[in-house]
Amino acid sequence: MSIGTATRTATYTTVDVENVVRRVRADLAMIADSTGAWTPQKAADYAHDIELLAKKGYLAWVDVTLLSGGTEIKAVRFDVDTDAGSMTTSRPGGVLWPKVAFAHLRIVISHTSAYNADAEREMTGKLRVGWTTTFDDTSHSSLSGGSGRNYTSNAYGMKRKDWTN
């Protein structure tokens, strides 16, 4: 009898990141269109920044919430997974988000520990959105968690989780 060890190395390229972010981009465009709360250009600007940050390894997650007069209606979160080789990929989309009175879409991103002062300087002038620090609650405790989707390409992926009221 012999006992061996195995090592698994997660590998992905910038093309893999682009493939995954393309699905997130499609979700953002559908959310913008169905709610009417963002222009197509605004959704594209957010997707641009998400892709840049993801390619550099600076993106941890993205959270989008539909609010009506301050009340959460729907939310989605995309969690980055850099060892997603065992996940199966899904198509973007799903249930359309509603048009609501006083609609506001909030997007919050979280960065990895690699996003330090040097990284922030490196990204200056490259991001399209004027991101600011927020302390908004993104736990979505007033909503019910539902199904999600996985977007993957080789070892790079994003796990999408949806919430609704």
Image (cartoon, rainbow, N blue to C red):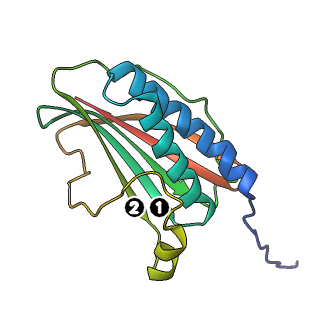
**Disc 1 residue type (three-letter):** Ala
In the rendered image, the vertical position of residue 124 relative to residue 165, given as above or below: below
Residue 86 visible in the shown view: no
Position of 153 with respect to 63 (left or right) is right
**Real-space Cα separation, disc 2 to disc 1, in angstroms:** 5 Å
Choose between 140 and 132: the one closer to the eye: 132
92 with respect to 71 (left or right): right
When asked about the image quadrant of residue 163, the answer is top left
The disc placed on residue 110 is: 2
Q: Residue at x 54, y 37 (%)?
A: 25
Q: Does residue 23 appear in this view? A: yes
Name the amino acid type tagged 2.
Ser
Query: Closest to the observer: 96 or 6?
Result: 96
Mark 2 crowdedness (10 Å alpha carbons): few <14, some 14-19, many ≥20: some
Instruction: Residue at 47% x, 33% y: name it.
Output: 41
Quarter that holds the C terminus:
top left
Quadrant housing the N terminus: bottom right
Q: Quadrant of residue 37?
A: top left
Pinpoint residue 24: horizontal percent, then vertical percent: 53, 39
Where in the figure is residue 38, as x and y percent of width and height? 36, 31
Mark seen at residue 60: 1
Residue 147, compared with residue 17, is above or below; it is above
Residue 119 marker: none
Asked whether the residues under the numbered discs 2 and 1 touch, taking CB atoms below 8 Å apart as contact, a structural biologist would say yes
The residue furthest front is 125
Q: Secondary structure at mark 1?
A: strand
* Among numbered discs 2 and 1, the one appearing first in the sequence: 1
Residue 122 at x, y = what percent?
54, 73
User: 106 above or below 27?
Assistant: below
